[in-house]
Image (cartoon, rainbow, N blue to C red):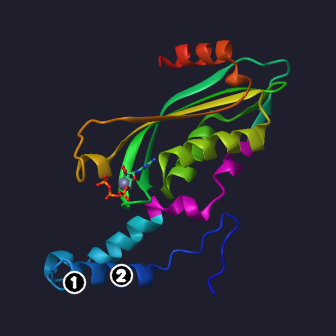
Amino acid sequence: MVEKNEQGFGPIDKPRVEAAVRELLLAIGEDPDREGLLGTPDRVARACEEVLGGMQEDPGAHLRKQFHEPGNQEMVIVKDIPFSSLCEHHILPFTGRAHVCYIPRDGRITGLSKIARCVSGYARRLQVQERLTGQIADAMVRELDPLGVLVVLEAEHTCMTMRGIRAAGALTTTSAVRGCLRDLKTREEALRLLGL
Ligand SMILES: Nc1nc2c(ncn2[C@@H]2O[C@H](COP(=O)(O)OP(=O)(O)OP(=O)(O)O)[C@@H](O)[C@H]2O)c(=O)[nH]1
Ligand SMILES: [Zn+2]
């Protein structure tokens, strides 16, 4: 049996991905031995390692790079963090921007880039946007114990734009709220600062 990591995933088996891509090419009526496709199974396998690399890490661990600013309980907002993920229903990309807002507890803050790294780690998995949003918020709560967290994701799903309903330009917004950001007034201030 394949050993799973602490995130619940096995390792990426590159030769197996390559064999599966070759089989897929045959299944769609292509010739995997024609010149243009010769390197494709290897390229797709390498691309999988990259775009699904978040399965091999604990994205929350980035947030453990912390600093202490005594007395600071003011809102921190990191806006417009770009992300790319893969929808687990069609294995097609959905891409967009994440906005993360939190209120530190007793000045316990994290490195700003670490928030973007956390988003990237959870995005580089097979996902649904709602779960991705909640996982980011929960990691913030787990690692920082902040007074409140608000995560908003806006994304375009290619499974909705290049196939199926083909609703080009349709944008999906999801949010996850924890702690004191559930309070209407605090949340309104966060949304105002986010321009949402
Ligand atoms: N809630 C949610 N739905 C998603 C996400 N990504 C894709 N979907 C949806 O998953 C659904 C899968 O529906 P199915 O009827 O099983 O699949 P389908 O026949 O390909 O559906 P259509 O896309 O409507 O053609 C679709 O409505 C997709 O739009 C996501 O991140 N969140
Ligand atoms: Zn999809």
Amino acid carrying label 1: it is Leu
Q: Going by the image, does 117 lie left or right of 138?
A: left
Q: Which of disc 1 and disc 2 is earlier in sequence?
A: 2
Q: Residue at x 77, y 37 (%)?
A: 144
Q: Residue at x 65, y 39 (%)?
A: 137
For mark 1, give the secondary structure.
helix
Amino acid carrying label 2: it is Ala
Q: Residues within 10 Å of mark 1 (few under 14, many from 20)?
A: few
Tell me the magenta residue range: 50-65
Q: Going by the image, does 53 lie left or right of 91?
A: right
Disc 2 to disc 1, how far (Cα)? 10 Å
Residue 56 among magenta residues: yes
Query: Measured from the top left, where is residue 56 in percent x and y?
Result: 59, 65
For mark 2, give the secondary structure.
helix
Query: Measured from the top left, where is residue 164 in percent x and y?
Result: 24, 53
User: Split into 4 quadrants, where in the image is the N terminus?
Assistant: bottom right
- Quickly name the residue at label 2: 20
- Quickly name the residue at label 1: 26
Residue 143: mark in rendering: none
Query: Measured from the top left, where is residue 45 in percent x and y?
Result: 39, 73
